[in-house]
Amino acid sequence: MLFAPIEGGLELRKQDDGSHRLSGRFPYNSLAVLSDGGRRGRPKKERFASRAFAYRVDRPDEEIHLLAGHSFDRPLASRGAGTLELTDTDDALSFAAIITAGIAATTYGADVLAMVAAGLAVGLSPGFRIPPERAVPPDEAETVEDEGSNPEEGEHNALIRTVHQALLFELSIVTRPAYPESQVEARSWQPSANLPVPRPRRAYTWR
């Protein structure tokens, strides 16, 4: 599973019945710097195209969870339980979740709510997979391009990966987002040696 944390404006409201309403958004077409390239390497950047998660999001029967820190042992809400609602637009994937009083009373639930309220957990990170090649050709699922080198225009010879189609399985509340517009690690990836020709990706791990 791949992860992509982003900062994007989590909103938390306590309800009269002891539950909490938590909402946030993951913006599309927002460029995140994953690595500055170190002393000798090239910077790496990433973005998600509009509706990149549409395949599973548009199918209501596909279960998607809201988790604490990408742990399925720490669920906060889910579509199957009727406590997670997703709204997909060209601009962003937004969610609204009900954290029930029972979940809020658990140790991990109370911890997450306390960290969100304190402004310490401000990241929203989707857990996803790139579709298999038998379903989606690699160049339709993701592409890599050369940014070019023009520091005055903000270009620093980076490799830019764009995810066009991804299978979303969960959204997680995390402490450190990579994308500045999202809110609630860094992923490693190996670019193609012959840009801009894409190649399948394997090891992406957001922290």
Image (cartoon, helix red, strand yellow):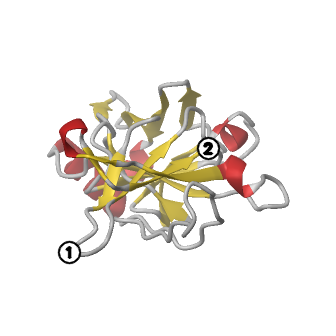
Residue 191, how many percent across, how many down? Answer: 51, 66
Give me the residue at 44% from left, 42% from top: 100
Q: Relative to residue 11, is residue 107 depicted above or below? A: below
- Relative placement, left or right, of 175 versus 97 is left
Which of the two residues, 191 or 207, is positioned nearer the viewer here? 191
Q: Amino acid at mark 1?
A: Arg
Return the disc, 2 or 1, that comes first in the chain's sequence: 1
**Distance between the Cα atoms at labels 2 and 1?**
30 Å
Nearer the observer, 83 or 9: 9
The image quadrant of residue 60 is top right
Q: Which residue is disc 2 drawn over?
A: 164
Contact flag, marks 2 and 1 (Cβ < 8 Å):
no
200 with respect to 16 (left or right): right
Q: Amino acid at mark 2?
A: His
Q: Is residue 168 above or below residue 36?
A: above
Residue 206 in view here: yes
Position above or below: 202 against 137: below
For image coordinates 37% across by 49% down, the residue present is 148
User: Is residue 66 something one can see in this rendering?
Assistant: no
How many numbered circles are shown? Answer: 2
For mark 1, what is the residue?
A: 39
Q: Quadrant of the N terminus?
A: bottom right
- Crowd rating for badge 1 (residues with CA inside 10 Å; few <14, some 14–19, many 20+): few
Q: What quarter of the picture does the C terminus occupy?
A: bottom left
Element at label 1: loop
Q: Residue at x 35, y 56 (%)?
A: 158
Q: Nearer the viewer, residue 118 or 105?
A: 118
Q: Secondary structure at mark 2?
A: loop
Of marks 2 and 1, the one in the foreground: 1
Residue 29, horizontal then vertical, whole percent: 45, 35
Residue at horizontal 56 percent and vertical 32 percent from the top:
50
Q: Position of residue 102 (x, y in %)?
A: 43, 50
